[in-house]
Amino acid sequence: MSKIIKVSVIVPHKDIVTIEISKDSTAEDAKKILIEQHHFEDGKYAFIYLGNFLSETNTFKHVPNGAKLVVFIKSLDKVQKEEEEARLKKESIINAENNIKEFIKISQLQQLYNNTEIWANLPEMGQVSQLLQNPANLYEFVCYDCDHTICPGIDPNDILSIMLTLLDYNIEEHLPPVSDFDIELESLNKVQQDIFNSVYSSCQQLEKPVVLAKLKEVDFNKEQALAELFGEK
């Protein structure tokens, strides 16, 4: 026979009661006791002990006699509301996906991005880029009549990424190779990048790698780099 323990159950800022329950009881069993014996409200119950949420099964297996538990109760109205919101969100995401697919079709994105000679279509790509750079128009089309959006932000590049995902397109395969210099420049922090841009704007007759190498040599001291690049003493 399972051991019977006494535990205190606390509803924050409301009630505290003591119940007797067996070690092999579930959260549902405890909920039933609290409703029937102490007139707690019905809803979704979450039991917490020492800062950890207890499982719905084997809830009291590791709870000692005399323990104090906290229970959070989500009302049935709130549970039903959240379920309805989840259903509407799922429907609106499907609507958003359909709108994006329609946008892809109308804007001929599929034709452009599926062309292996993508860089031969620069005029068309320019037109598409201009369209994508107008978030207001894009959102008005893509998110029309949708309560939720699958777009992670207002950045057109984020929207473009989703479109390419729907096309099952790997743009990395068609981009020009990234040079070692570009990788090195990208690895600089913002302050270093600002210093590099400032120095390079003053001596654009020099190659960028030369300017960066000099800056790294003088630990990104702007004045010293300019002096040495221009041969000042």
Image (tube, grey):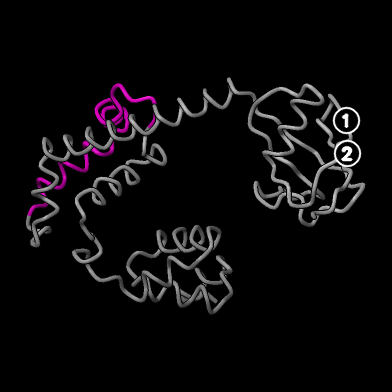
> Residue 30, position in %: x, y?
74, 38
* Residue identified by numbered label 1: 16
Q: Pick whichever of labels 1 and 2 is earlier in the sequence.
A: 2
- Name the residue type under label 1: Ile
Q: Give the range drawn in magenta.
A: 121-148
- Residue in view at x 52 percent, y 76 percent: 216
Please tell me whether residue 136 belongs to the stretch shown in magenta: yes
Badge 1, how many Cα within 10 Å: few under 14, some, many 20+?
A: some
- For the N terminus, give its image quadrant: bottom right
In the image, residue 15 above or below residue 23: above
Which disc number belongs to residue 67?
none
Left or right of 28? Residue 109 is: left
Farthest residue to the right: give it. 66
Callout 1 secondary element: strand
What type is the residue that disc 2 sits on?
A: Ser
Structural distance between the alpha carbons of marks 1 and 2:
7 Å
Instruction: Kindly state the secondary structure of the residue where label 2 is placed.
Output: strand
- The verdict on residue 25 being magenta is no
* Residue at (90% x, 50% y) in the render: 65
- 158 relative position to 186: left or right: left
Q: Is 223 in front, or is 57? A: 57
